[in-house]
Image (cartoon, rainbow, N blue to C red):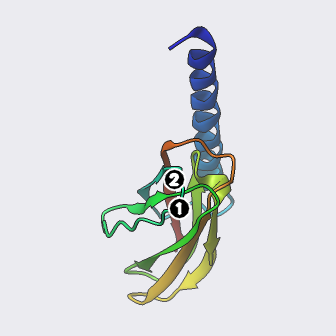
Amino acid sequence: MNYKQYFLVVVIGLIALSLFAIMYTWFWYSPTPCSNFKSIDASITIESAPRPIIGLNTDTNSLAFGTLSPTAMVKRSIIVNYSHEATVQVMMTGPLASWVTITPDQFNLPAAENKEVDFFISVPADTSDGSYNGTTLFCFRE
């Protein structure tokens, strides 16, 4: 790895760390702090090919979007539940954050009920092949 590549990796890492710190601070020090805070790892693999790729991943322990080609779009869903009535806020941090739209990203959740949250990912056309990760954050405010 040459100096420019190393520098770029360090800068991207610092930006990702800074975004995570900002989001974590926002969750922690908001007017109504999180009663409970959960996170789920998110990942995607980008692979350019002559024909578009939409590979599925059925992993239930993380939000894995599978293998996609640049310009591909896919949806994954998570069922959210909580033992108490709460307002839930959902967000994504890391390199995937700008590619993901979360619907709904904030909602009221009655005690012991389920709510489906959809994650739509749209891979930019200029994305390089490789693996990209992020973290999905759930803030529960009772």
Write the residue at 64% across / 14% down.
4
Residue 86 can be seen, yes or no: no
The label number, if any, that marks residue 49 in the structure image: 2
Between residue 114 and residue 134, name the one nearer to us: 134
User: Looking at the image, is 33 positioned above or below residue 28?
Assistant: below
Mark 2: amino acid: Ala
Write the residue at 62% across / 54% down.
97
Report which residue position mark 1 lands on: 51
Q: Position of residue 35 (x, y in %)?
A: 48, 64
Q: Position of residue 103 (x, y in %)?
A: 62, 77
Mark 1: amino acid: Arg
* Gap in angstroms between the C-alphas marked 2 and 1: 5 Å
User: Looking at the image, is 84 positioned above or below residue 69?
Assistant: below
Asked if residue 68 lies left or right of residue 126, the reply is left
**How dense is the environment of label 2, judged by Cα within 10 Å: few (below 14), some, or many (20 and up)?**
few
Asked if residue 140 lies left or right of residue 70, the reply is left
**How dense is the environment of label 1, judged by Cα within 10 Å: few (below 14), some, or many (20 and up)?**
few
Residue 51 can be seen, yes or no: yes
Seen as rendered, the residue at the extreme front is 50
